[in-house]
Amino acid sequence: MADATLKKIIKYDEEYYMACFGKRVPLVADHGKGVYLYGTDGKKYMDMIGGIAVNTLGHAHSKLTKAVADQAKKVIHCCNYYYNEPQTLLAKKLVELSFADKVFFANSGAEANEGAIKLARGYWYKKGTPKPKIITATMSFHGRTMATIAATGQEKFRTPFGPNLPGFEYVAYNDIEAIKNAADKETGAIMLELIQGESGVHPADYDYVQAVRKFCTKNKILLIIDEVQTGVGRTGTFFAYEQYGIKPDIISLAKGLAGGVPVGAVLATNEVATGFAPGDHGSTFGGNPLACAAGLAVVNEIESAELLKNVTETGAWIQEKLQKVAKKTKKISDVRGKGFLIGIELTSDSAADIKMKLFEKGFLVSSIGANVIRIAPPLILTKTQASKFVTALQDVLLGKE
Ligand SMILES: Cc1ncc(COP(=O)(O)O)c(C=O)c1O
């Protein structure tokens, strides 16, 4: 019976849904609990990808579902003509946790980055010195909208959809000289991820980020950090920039902020926030009461359950165990990342194959490119649970059924 649902949905998906996702992993998510997701066929999966760094508190977390249900009973949406308590309180909370003084809410990572790009350009325009050029990194990923594909340093995302938005220049990642060579008097911002998640989980070097910050300050260039994937505790600190000893001028957030309810956010200093005057920017849904109530529940739970400590400790423990698996199997060439954002590079181009074998064993991961497995589990994952994943991966790499 349950198998019939799987078959039906796959058939309908092929018939009615745009082919953007190609052939998907054969799982129709029915419900979840904690770090586990259950298919309509009743099978249980340990969710080691967490909706790609979204399900911060896992599935069906009692505090998150209560916050969403309570808010839904009161008011799901009201437009931004009026004040909205969860929106204001979540903005206050994010300011208290960060370098920022002001917040604007959007609905997704791409939309948060759109806001960040627009804010940077608006800031220099309003100062009377327009500087529209933005430097980003090759192999970066900033989203799928027209501005964010233009910001993304990977041609395959841009070329089919040209003409692309002008004003972006791409330079090698982790190379300060490349930035210095590309910057000129038109450069208003440099936009970077601190871990390039979508291109294989590549962390930025500490010295590089320090040097970029110094270069930006010296040359009056804004530093935008895209924390869509790394933010909200994912790397073991609430924001990844905290681990680099810098303060950005603008950051974008999304993914994990509301634990699965769509939300995005742009955070900036008071000075930079002058880039938006009344009427310059807006969003119908952005920052609505439902999303912000969910965001508040997530942020409060990260604090009260000490999840950052768990991410730091368990994340380091997973990497240590994976290094052992690498030694034993000789099938892993690199393990990298921070906290609960980990890339496992394989010695052969078999990431998609390994992903499917893990799926058959009841574990959900993502494959990036030909040879990287990425995990981004809920921040509530325990060592006991993680050890089951490590054992399963080792078995798969050793060819054990
Ligand atoms: C660093 C980064 N920026 C932006 C985005 C786009 O976010 P969204 O898919 O919510 O638009 C992503 C998504 O993977 C991302 O990883």
Image (cartoon, rainbow, N blue to C red):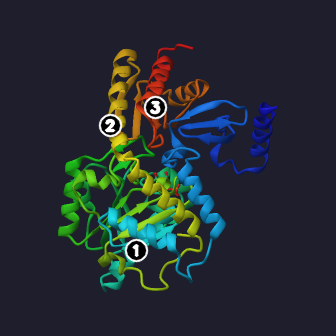
Q: How far apart are marks 2 and 3 (CA)?
A: 26 Å
Residue 77 seen in the figure? yes
Mark 1 vs mark 3: in front: 1
- Residue 93 position, x and y percent, is 39, 65
Q: Mark 3 points at which residue?
A: 371
How packed mark 3 is, by other alpha carbons closer than 10 Å (few <14, some 14-19, many 20 or more), is many
Q: Which residue is drawn at 33% across and 25% down?
A: 323
Q: Kindly identify the amino acid type of the residue bearing the numbered disc 2.
A: Glu
Q: In whole angstroms, how far apart are the C-alphas of marks 2 and 1? A: 36 Å
Q: In which quarter of the image is residue 160?
A: bottom right
Mark identifier at residue 313: 2
Residue sitting at 49 percent across and 85 percent down?
279
Quadrant position of the N terminus in the picture: top right
* Label 2 secondary element: helix
Mark 3 secondary-structure assignment:
loop
Task: Give the label, 2 or 3, closer to the camera.
Answer: 2
Q: In which quarter of the image is residue 38?
A: top right
Question: In the figure, residue 7 lies in which quadrant?
Answer: top right
Disc with the residue nearer the chain's start (2 vs 1): 1
Q: How crowded is mark 1: few (under 14 residues within 10 Å), some or many (20 or more)?
A: many
Name the spot of residue 50 as percent of width and height, x first.
52, 43
Determine whether, in the image, residue 295 is placed left or right of residue 124.
right
